[in-house]
Image (spheres, helix red, strand yellow):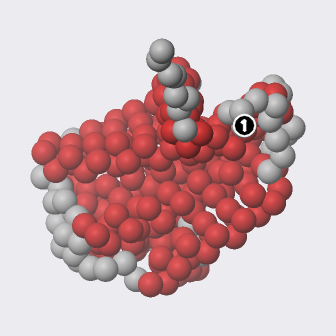
Amino acid sequence: MSVTTAAPPAAASRSGLGRLTVTELKLFVRERVGPIWGVGFPMLLLIIFGSIHSFKEPQKDFGGATTLDIYVPVLIAFTIAILALSALPMVLAGYREKGILRRLQTTPMGPVRLLTAQLAVNFAVTVVTVVAILVVARLAYGVGLPKQPVGFVVAALLAAAALMAVGLFVAATAGGGRTAQAIGTILFFPMMFFAGLWVPIAQMPDILRHISHGTPLGPAVQALQRASEGHWPHPQQLLVMAAYAVVFGLTSAKLFRWE
């Protein structure tokens, strides 16, 4: 007589979360916001900037670094921001609007696992895109890899945590998917301005530079640039990003509605 042993609850839980994450990844690929704007557009900007001869010449204003050296961390911030502020809140708010989160509350899967799967997908895509930007910048345009890799990873992780916390706050407060996407887009452009997308932070007037220091992406870009140059990110830069992650993360957890 054979005896069938049921899978332990923990193993079944991990298996269910894994399948859900794979499903969410497939849905992510079908959407245009994440793959096109969060992955494709930063790579396109890298190719365009790398094709400009003057961008590859050392600049005195940047301490001998090239303009392309300065813009690689900005493009990494671009990827983190577009995924965290547009893709993530749009999907989560859309699920709530359609009643998917409410229905999941009555199933063993639960809505928390869906939230976990979404965060895992966005984090994984962010990591892959950041690595791709660094590799392409190095192999195609001669941009050096970060000279302080540990500091670079810490800065990138804190930047992702801070922006995803803001994205969760948008998802928690927006009425639906389209509203969440609109709010995320409105937040994205000023954040990228103060991250140095249009004017490098070092060339901003003093008042704009001070404002940049108080945004999540301004310290993120500066921390990534410092790590690229071989220095540990300034503690203030890390603290600002950590503060955004904690404050908006806790607020999102308190305000988030499943229906």
Instruction: Give the residue at x 17% y 56%.
Output: 143
Circle 1: residue type: Gly
**Looking at the picture, how far across and down is residue 251, in whole percent?**
76, 63
Q: Which residue lies furthest to the top in this view?
A: 1
* Residue 64 quadrant: bottom left
**Looking at the picture, how far across and down is residue 35, in whole percent?**
46, 30
Seen from the viewer's position, the closer of residues 257 and 59 is 257
Instruction: Give the residue at x 67% y 62%.
Output: 249
Seen from the viewer's position, the closer of residues 57 and 138 is 138
Instruction: Give the residue at x 49% y 62%.
Output: 159
Whether residue 213 is visible here, answered yes or no, is yes
**Looking at the picture, how far across and down is residue 86, in whole percent?**
62, 41
Residue of label 1:
110
Q: Which residue lies furthest to the bottom in this view?
A: 235
Seen from the viewer's position, the closer of residues 196 and 111 is 111
Please state, as top left, top right, bottom left or bottom right, where the C terminus lies in the image. top right
Q: In the figure, 59 relative to 82: above or below?
A: below
Callout count: 1
